[in-house]
Amino acid sequence: MTLDTVKVGLIGAGRIGQAHAATLAYRAPGARLVAVADVVEQAARRCAEQFGIATATADYHEILADREITAVLICSGTDTHAQIIEEAARAGKHIFCEKPIALALASIDRALAAVEEAGVKLCIGFNRRFDANFQRIYRALRDGEIGRPEMLHITSRDPGPPPISYIKISGGIFLDMMIHDFDLARFLIGSEVEEVSAVGAVMVDPAIGEAGDLDTAIVVLRFANGVIGTIENSRRAAYGYDQRAEVLGSAGAVRVENNFPNTAIISDGTSVRRDLPLNFFMERYADAYASEMIAFIDAVARDGPVAVTGQDGRAPVVMALAARRSYDEHRPVLVSEIES
Ligand SMILES: NC(=O)c1ccc[n+]([C@@H]2O[C@H](COP(=O)([O-])OP(=O)(O)OC[C@H]3O[C@@H](n4cnc5c(N)ncnc54)[C@H](O)[C@@H]3O)[C@@H](O)[C@H]2O)c1
């Protein structure tokens, strides 16, 4: 069977939009990126030149109106996602949207309803599901290699905090940073989280506290299937991006470590040492970003299911809202409290 080339439009030509454009240009033979839109027209033009995209525009509506285009990638700022999802669905486009869908559940629900009504595909950019390390944990659990899972621990630390201007619009540490870990937790354990307890602090930069946010947090999760999980986040790790996870099961454990730029171990008379881990997400998850995009194109081309659904995009937002309420009210919060 030969599959038609999927014609794609990119909305938002910033950091992550360019990463996806590179995948479509070099690693996804089944897709062709034919148009790019960015409110900063110069950014759209630069992206078009770099990746050989025929059309560059400042107005994404041109992409939505183009009948040749069957799929769009929404890689603009978070505050634009829900609105563009609604419009893209109404235009009949299949949609890949970066995380998070939105910071408020009402906006997410409107967007998901539009997708449902239009009958188009929506895939959310939770890239960690495609990382080779976390995939291996997933398979170990799926195949029963460590028996019945009992405890999960995710360590997730950034090398340094983003600018305060970004912190102010980010939605806070739970919605901006831990959201990836909430998604990973649901993905690995394969069960919904029922209860969330959070403790947090400002240890990295007092300005983060003045902006109403935290930079250090630990969350305990209670899953419907009985598993207990912990996630810890810090906005600062002096040694770089720290992305590890472990699951303890009834018959053993599975653990993944950080990825490094090389495998050299240097031993001398005083220590055994190695270079620092890959510094941040664009390096650490480069292959995961490519794999998620290739999987999305494949789902569109073959009319198959997407790997990360709209509901998968919504659930971590609910968990993040529960975590913030738990921190504010100093008590465990049921996820059902956020829903009601
Ligand atoms: N999955 C991940 O690991 C990951 C990593 C980084 C960013 N993201 C998400 O991707 C999104 C973009 O992040 P980024 O780091 O690339 O930001 P960025 O600021 O580098 O890029 C965003 C681009 O979108 C453009 N834009 C804004 N509004 C637009 C509109 N209405 N129409 C067209 N273009 C518009 C901006 O001009 C900018 O060029 C955010 O939602 C962020 O949360 C996800």
Image (cartoon, rainbow, N blue to C red):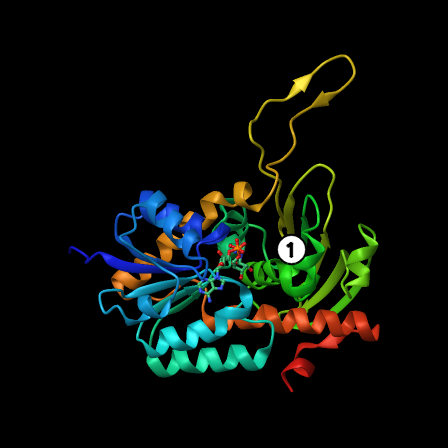
Q: Is residue 283 above or below residue 292?
A: above
Q: Is residue 83 left or right of residue 29?
A: right
Residue 230, given in percent of the width and then of the height, sits at 71, 58
**Residue furthest left as drawn:** 1
Quarter of the picture containing the C terminus is bottom right
Q: How many marks?
A: 1
35 or 69, which lies in front? 35
Q: Is residue 294 left or right of residue 276?
A: left
What amino acid does circle 1 point to? Answer: Ser
* Residue depicted at 26% across the width and 61% down the height: 301
Say few, some or many: other residues with alpha carbon within 10 Å of mark 1 (under 14 / 14 to 19 / 20 or more): few
Q: Is residue 142 above or below residue 323?
A: above
Residue 118, given in percent of the width and then of the height, sits at 34, 80
Q: Is residue 16 left or right of residue 336?
A: left
202 or 47, which lies in front? 47
Residue 329, given in percent of the width and then of the height, sits at 82, 75
Q: Which residue is mark 1?
A: 250
Residue 122, given in percent of the width and then of the height, sits at 40, 69
* Residue depicted at 62% across the width and 40% down the height: 257
- In terms of secondary structure, where does tag 1 sit? loop
* Residue depicted at 70% across the width and 45% down the height: 160
322 or 225, which lies in front? 322
User: Would residue 154 be seen by someone viewing this image from the given angle?
Assistant: yes
44 or 191, which lies in front? 44
Q: Is mark 1 within 8 Å of ligand 1?
A: no
User: Would residue 200 be seen by someone viewing this image from the given angle?
Assistant: no
**Residue furthest bottom as drawn:** 340
